[in-house]
Image (cartoon, rainbow, N blue to C red):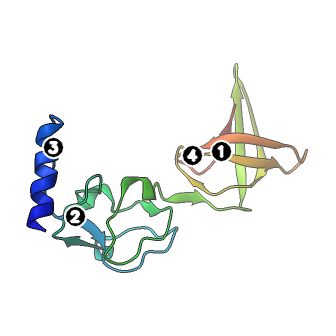
Amino acid sequence: MILRASILAALGIALGTTATLADTLVAARNLRAQTVITSADLGYAAEPTMGAVAEPSDAIGLETRVTIFAGRPVMPQDLGPAALIDRNQIIVMIYNHAGLEILTDGRALDRGGIGDRIRVMNMTSRSTVTGRITESGTVEVR
């Protein structure tokens, strides 16, 4: 392990970057996809992993996009915002344009969190549109 840390440090110096050689944030237990992370779900491993999440505060409250097995590093690409809308959930769609606001019911065809773009089927016309999830749990269609 010391040899690997030395190689990583040397690589960082050779590339002109500073390699971070700290404890690595790992899953304390198996975390299935769509699990919202709490402090009890995280632990540390002594072996450094380049690109892994370094601080627990950067992971707590986020949702796993894939299964992370116990002892494996927590990578930023494996996390995302917690879902507000589930697939097949009935939601409110909002269309705003030039002072006109239309609200209607829709069925979510995807799952997502704040800021995610999802497909929604208009319950009246049965047409499919794409919109962005707002903080209030509605979908804004443009």
Secondary structure at badge 3 equals helix
Question: Relative to residue 60, is residue 121 depicted above or below?
Answer: above
Secondary structure at badge 4 equals loop
Q: Which residue is mark 4?
A: 116
| Nearer mark to the viewer, of 2 and 3 | 3
Q: Which residue is mark 3?
A: 12
Image location (x, y in percent) of residue 85: 62, 58
Mark 2 and mark 3 residues within 8 Å of each other at the beta carbon: no
User: The disc labelled 4 sits on which kind of residue?
Assistant: Asp
Alpha-carbon span between mark 1 and mark 4: 10 Å
Alpha-carbon span between mark 1 and mark 3: 44 Å
User: What is the crowding at mark 1: few (fewer than 14 residues within 10 Å), some, or many (at least 20)?
Assistant: many
Can you tell which mark lies on residue 139?
1
Question: Relative to residue 50, is residue 117 depicted above or below?
Answer: above
Q: Which quarter of the figure is the N terminus placed in?
A: bottom left
Q: Residue at x 23, y 57 (%)?
A: 54
Earlier residue among tags 2 and 3? 3
Q: Residue at x 77, y 41 (%)?
A: 129
Alpha-carbon span between mark 3 and mark 4: 35 Å
Earlier residue among tags 1 and 3? 3
Earlier residue among tags 4 and 2? 2
Q: Which residue is mark 2?
A: 24
Q: Is residue 116 visible?
A: yes
| Nearer mark to the viewer, of 1 and 4 | 4
Q: Is residue 27 left or right of residue 111?
A: left
Alpha-carbon span between mark 4 and mark 2: 28 Å
Mark 1 and mark 3 residues within 8 Å of each other at the beta carbon: no
Secondary structure at badge 2 equals strand
Q: Residue at x 87, y 43 (%)?
A: 127
Nearer to me, 74 or 64: 74
User: The disc labelled 3 sits on which kind of residue?
Assistant: Gly
Question: Relative to residue 30, is residue 89 depicted above or below?
Answer: above
